[in-house]
Amino acid sequence: MSVLAKASYFWRSAASGLRHAPFVHFVAVTTIAIALFSAGLAQAVGQMVEGLLGSLGGEVQVTVYLSPELDEEGASVLRERMVATSGGRATLVPPQAALERLATELGDLGEALSHLPENPLPPSLELEVPPERRTPGALKSLAKELRAMPGVTGVDYGEEAVERLSAISKALRVGGWVAFAVVLLTTVIIVSATLQLAIYARREEIEIQKLVGATDRFVKAPFLIEGFLQGLLGAAVALAGLLTFEHLVGPGLASLFSFLVGTGGGVTVLEPGLALQLLAAGCGLGLGGSFIAVGRFLRV
């Protein structure tokens, strides 16, 4: 039998196996689809969280409060030193400018500030930190360096908010990997079990093939292709589900989180790269489950 004839037979046999046990294979395809849909949705949520962290991280600004006794020349020298230390940009905010800004932010209540006997706000430097130094550890280290400089009375960069967001992001990543591992194991087991049923249903056909001299590879090939087709179909269903989710739910999510991540159009759930990854993952899950099934239970 030629290679082309063998390949044709394998694919026909795999397709016939899918048709003869539709419910069993439907369970496997549905399981793969749910797993891949969940993985794709988790990826989209992760991108939204990263976008949130990026947008907030882009606004991270270190405010350095200076001693009131520090003159303009001393503040200028300190500003240059901070720029050299952080690699960012620093803007000097005089006490009067800070008070006017506070009055503007308070709106109608800002008029009360005009009755103060003296300006309580100290001069400050607003330091814009470069992206590579916006991690919690880097910001904490930078704040420690700045506090040690002479003429500095305090440093504020929203430490609690930055660390909390970083912890949330880390927890989501770890939880996502754990959930993915559990779903992956469950999917492989279910796919393997469905193919075991398919193998058992065709045991007489397999025995006849072995009696006429068929090799183990020849017998196993159609079942491996069945697993591949299960994974491919499951990935296709998952991609269709993600596209539907993006079309129906995406605009609502975009409007809900636009004030945080600045999404003006819609939430992009399914990108081309992710689609290819899900297709590859689906085929891999199907092949993995079928390989386990034929390796453990196809002993004829």
Image (cartoon, rainbow, N blue to C red):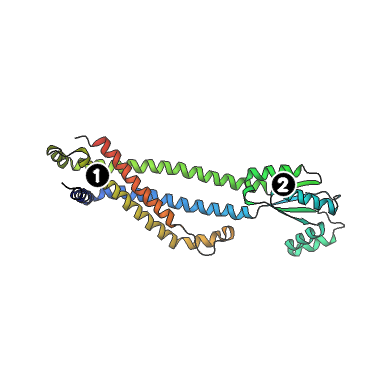
- At which x and y percent is residue 184? 39, 43
> Residue at label 1?
223
Q: Which residue is rendered at x = 58% and y = 53% of the image?
A: 54
Q: Residues within 10 Å of mark 2 (few under 14, many from 20)?
A: few
Q: Are marks 2 and 1 in contact (CB under 8 Å)?
A: no
Q: Is residue 114 above or below residue 164?
A: below
Could you tell me the amino acid type at mark 1? Phe
- At which x and y percent is residue 188? 34, 42
Q: CA distance from mark 2 to mark 1?
A: 63 Å
Give the position of the C terminus as an image quadrant. Answer: top left
- At which x and y percent is residue 64? 75, 50
Could one spot residue 190 in this view of the protein?
no
Q: Earlier in the sequence, mark 2 or mark 1?
A: 2
Q: Which residue is rendered at x = 63% and y = 45% of the image?
A: 136
Secondary structure type for disc 2:
helix
Q: Is residue 111 above or below residue 37?
A: below
> Residue at label 2?
85
- At which x and y percent is residue 175? 49, 43
Q: Residues within 10 Å of mark 1 (few under 14, many from 20)?
A: many
Picture quadrant where residue 271 is located: bottom left
Picture quadrant where residue 126 is located: bottom right
Could you tell me the amino acid type at mark 2? Thr
